Amino acid sequence: MIKTFRGLMADGAQDTIVLHTSDGSTGYRIVKFQIITKTPYDTNAAEHIIKIYKISQTAVDGVVDFSDQTLLGVATINNNTAGYQYPITTTIVFDREIFNQDLYITHKEAVNAEACNYYFELEQVKLDLNQNTVATLKDIRNVTAPV
C-alpha cells in the first residue's frame, strides 16, 4: 500500500507527519519525494531545501549532512535568475531505510523566504516482530542519542 503526503511550507517551518502506531508493526519507506516552489518560473531567485527526518528538529537550516542517521531524504530547488529561468532540482532519498515512527519535514529558503510545496509517497510495510524491534530501537536511539 502507498500513502501520499503533500503540503505547502513557509520558510523556516517544520511539519509533522503522524505515522506511529500502538504496536509498531507497520513500517514505511520513502519511494518518491518531490518539491516545487509556490510560484514556479517566477522571476524572483529562490533556493529551497526540504528535508525529511526521523526526529523533530530544534532548528531548521539549509545544511545537508549525510552522516546524520535521522535524515531520510533531501530535495533542493534552485531558481537562479542571473543565469537561467528554469529551476534546477536535486532529490536524494535513502529508500532502503524502514521506519515506524512519525516523520518531520523542514523547509529553508535562502534568498527570499518564499514558500515551497512538497509531495512524497511512502510504501507501507508489515513488520514481523524482529523488524519491529529493530525499527523501534533505532527510533528510540535517535531520540535519546546525544547531539
Image (cartoon, rainbow, N blue to C red):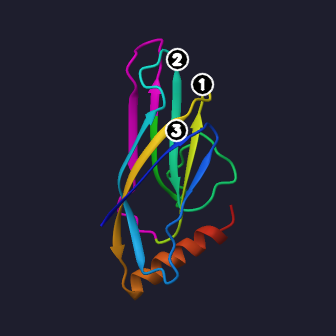
Q: Circle 2 is placed at which residue position?
A: 44
Which percent across, then down, holds residue 116? 51, 36
Residue type of the residue flagged with mark 3: Ile
Q: Point out the image quarter for the N terminus.
A: bottom left
Q: Specify whether 62 is left or right of 94.
A: right
Q: What residue lies at 61% left-to-right and 24% top-to-bottom?
A: 112
Residue type of the residue flagged with mark 1: Val
| Count of numbered circles on the image | 3
Q: Specify whether 56 is left or right of 122.
A: right
Q: What residue lies at 41% left-to-right and 88% top-to-bottom?
A: 129
Is residue 33 within the magenta segment?
Answer: no
SS class, disc 1: loop
N-terminal-most mark, 2 or 3: 2
- Asked whether the beta carbons under mark 3 and mark 1 sit within 8 Å of each other, the answer is no
Q: Circle 1 is placed at which residue position?
A: 111
Which percent across, then down, holds residue 145? 65, 69
Q: Specify whether 122 is left or right of 66.
A: left
Front in this rendered view, residue 88 or 147: 88
Name the residue at the bottom extreme. 129
Residue type of the residue flagged with mark 2: Asn
Q: Give the magenta range.
A: 77-99
SS class, disc 3: strand
